[in-house]
Image: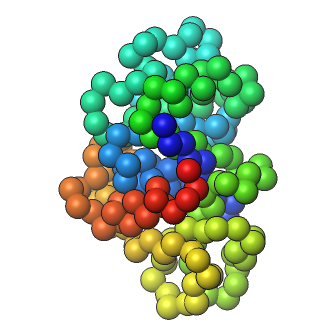
Amino acid sequence: MPALTVWSREDGVLGALAPIGLAAAAGTAIVVDLDGRGPRYPGDTSLADLVQRGPRRLELSPRRGGVCLLRNGGITAGEAAEVLDAIVAGWPNVVFRLPAAVEPPVTAVTVLPLVPGGLFPPLGRRLVMQSAGWRTPVPTGAIVLPRPRRSTLNRLLLGMQPPRGDRWIRAWRRVWGAGWT
């Protein structure tokens, strides 16, 4: 079961949306927020809930295709280790969202905005760069995402499937095949 970890230090909106885009590109996936102060993704259950009451069989594998969002609920990855292992074992694709304040593992998918002026240095690791519309040099080996459509972002933030064939979601597919897994 492929599992990728996503991290964005500078941009909170990109840090919340990037994991959803990556998961949507996989087709069937779950996004698990490892940030105790992370976004309140849509849904009735949090990772903390699963740890507290124990996960149900239905929560440990997909019932249908699409993306499941699991907000954090105020728990650390260490406290949730058993549940996280069970999720990875049961889901075909897992995306972990890291808090911006932690130092990510080298294998993490680092997502940065692509803007002029060198404001966001590449950090010496493999990158996904989110285009912001400027023509600016791209760090060697970086995957560049096109600017997403507003309708795509709205649907993802509401917990809905993005428009079929969306170019931003298609661009995320390259990340799954880029050797991070």
Please state if 17 lies on the left or on the right of 166 as rendered.
Answer: right
Looking at the picture, how far across and down is residue 10, in whole percent? 67, 64
Can you give x and y, in whole percent of width and height, for residue 157 in the image?
Answer: 40, 48
**Residue at coordinates 55% horizontally, 22% vertically from top-left?**
86
Between 96 and 44, the one nearer to me in the picture: 96
Q: Residue furthest top?
A: 53
Q: At 62% from the left edge and 82% from the top edge, which residue is drawn?
A: 139
Q: Compared with residue 165, is residue 45 higher up or lower down, i.e. above or below?
A: above
State whether residue 8 is above or below residue 52.
Answer: below
Mark count: 0
| Residue at image point 40% right, 24% down | 61
> What colour scheme has been applied to the protein in the rendered image?
rainbow
Please tell me in which quadrant of the rendered image residue 33 appears.
top right
Tell whether 92 sits left or right of 40.
Answer: left
Res 172 visible:
no
Residue 176 in sight? yes
Instruction: Give residue 50's quadrant in the image.
Output: top right
Above or below, 58 against 141 in this view is above
Please state the horizontal and vertical placement of residue 173, each as a whole percent of the image: 40, 60
Query: Where residue 150 sits in the image (x, y, percent)?
Result: 33, 64
Vertical placement of 176 versus 137: above or below? Answer: above
Q: Work out whether residue 104 or residue 161 is closer to the camera in this orientation and state it.
A: 104
Based on the displayed image, in which of its 4 quarters is residue 112 positioned?
A: bottom right
**Image point 36% across, 27% down: which residue?**
62
> Furthest residue to the left?
164
